[in-house]
Amino acid sequence: MTSNRRQSKRCYVYVALPGQTQLVTAARFELANGIGRFVYGRSYLARKDAVEIDPVELKLGKGQFETAMLNGVFGALRDASPDYWGRLVIERAMGSVQLDEIDYLLQSADDRAGALAFGHNEKPPPPKRDFNKTLKLTELQQTALALLDEKKFARGAGAQQVEKLMLLGTSMGGARPKAVVEDRSGLWIAKFNKPQDKWNNARVEHAMLELARRCGITSAESKTVRVGDRDALLVKRFDRDKTRKGYLRARMVSALTLLRAEDTPESKRNWSYPALAEELRRVCAAPGDAARELFRRMCFNALISNTDDHPRNHAIIARDRAWQLSPAYDLTPAPTIGMERDLAMTVGDFGRRATAQNLLSQCRRFLLTYEEASAIVAEMQEIVRSEWYGVARAAKVTMRDCDKIRNALENEGFSFVAEAA
Ligand SMILES: Nc1ncnc2c1ncn2[C@@H]1O[C@H](COP(=O)(O)OP(=O)(O)OP(=O)(O)O)[C@@H](O)[C@H]1O
Ligand SMILES: [Mg+2]
């Protein structure tokens, strides 16, 4: 192993403290043979305004934290690391170079979700100031869609292409092509429609975020914009607040981390809404509100057949010391052939089944009585039934696309009653 390679196994972890736009050095992270080691710096711990990186594994404290989970990458660091899309960008840019987890952390752009940043130097770099402007969307979309075509970027891209690729930003999670863009109001995530999409995803997701609001859920602000001959969805970043001095950053931790779970098939049995409700009750400043809001989100996902509701599609954020559920994001209906559908996470006594009976079966863990939970389910069912079409049409979803997603939203299986589990 070269010394260069050895060096790339360690990095410093920087954080933007509440109310501040500059980064400070918080900790050192080392990864060796699948074991991750994390130590908060002494001077960081001595600060009165020091905050924990996450409320589960990396609470503020002296000594070394160790993990063998997730190939040694602590959940909160993995949350700040690129996901399928960002990794694809980096891989296309770097060609066939073998990359490890620390490489991905260090290679990814500093517009990542949350308040963390990473680097080799003890002193943090100045915060990024230059973001893609919304005006660049056409070019970004072109690059993003070209990137999906393996042939166009096979065997590493040329220098000019790399430059273009890196403009996409690499560190926001998720699988869909996306880029971070800025306008006068702040930062947005642009999610691009793909040529092979079955319907206009941008408009449908925008409609679902609005429908969720009608159901009493706090969801991310969004809008659709025309980019070339397509639509893109712009979702306002809830982890960045624009100020005159730069951006304030909220810390952000996914539900995957809260559940101490992984993204592997074996770990899926730990993906559970009731368990997540209990974690929220433990870490959030307003535990009852968070648990009840999660109940609504679970119910909404069942009502719109959002079967891609995996734990990275839920998160908590902290703008100051206190943690709270983030606004809802990534809400997409998935029509199925049969009427029975399963969410990605356990719902209740009947596993992942998306039925009212299952939603109600463990409602107390969400701090709701059976009567309260039943009233919420009935109210939301009625709102989705009577309003989805109007909301979709107002979001300019075509009648044809409405027909394609109808089965997900007019979901008869929701009322099925099963024999006792
Ligand atoms: N409005 C937002 N503000 C800040 N971070 C966000 C916001 N929306 C999403 N994120 C972060 O970006 C990630 C990717 O976003 P999103 O889930 O919408 O993308 P996706 O590609 O559709 O995901 P998936 O792979 O689940 O389909 C999320 O997991 C979350 O960490
Ligand atoms: Mg997602």
Image: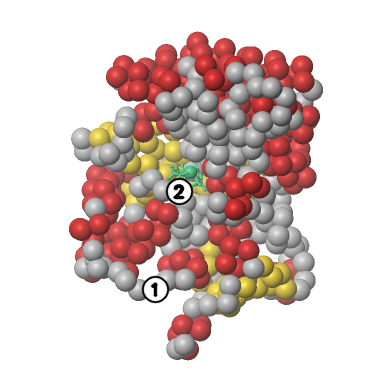
- Relative image position of residue 68 (x, y in whole percent): 64, 68
- Relative image position of residue 325 (x, y in whole percent): 64, 40
Residue type at mark 2?
A: Gly
Q: Is mark 1 within 8 Å of ligand 1?
A: no
Residue where numbered disc 2 is placed: 174
| Foreground label between 2 and 1 | 1
Residue at the image position 73 percent from the left and 45 percent from the top? 279
Q: Nearer the viewer, residue 105 or 311?
A: 311
Residue at the image position 71 percent from the left and 60 percent from the top? 57
Furthest residue in direction front, as rendered? 419
Residue type at mark 1?
A: Gln
Mark 2 or mark 1, which has the lower sequence index? 1
Alpha carbon of mark 2 to alpha carbon of mark 1: how far?
21 Å
Q: Nearer the viewer, residue 288 or 131?
A: 288
Q: Residues within 10 Å of mark 1 (few under 14, many from 20)?
A: few
Q: Residues within 10 Å of mark 2 (few under 14, many from 20)?
A: some
| Horizontal side, residue 37 vs residue 141: left or right | right
The secondary structure type at the circle numbered 2 is: loop
Q: Is mark 2 within 8 Å of ligand 1?
A: yes
Note whether residue 51 is visible.
no
Note whether residue 360 is visible.
yes
Residue at the image position 45 percent from the left and 88 percent from the top? 2
Residue at the image position 44 percent from the left and 38 percent from the top? 235
- Relative image position of residue 248 (x, y in whole percent): 56, 51
- Relative image position of residue 62 (x, y in whole percent): 77, 71
Q: Are marks 2 and 1 in contact (CB under 8 Å)?
A: no
Residue where numbered disc 1 is placed: 98
| Horizontal side, residue 283 vs residue 170: left or right | right
The secondary structure type at the circle numbered 1 is: loop
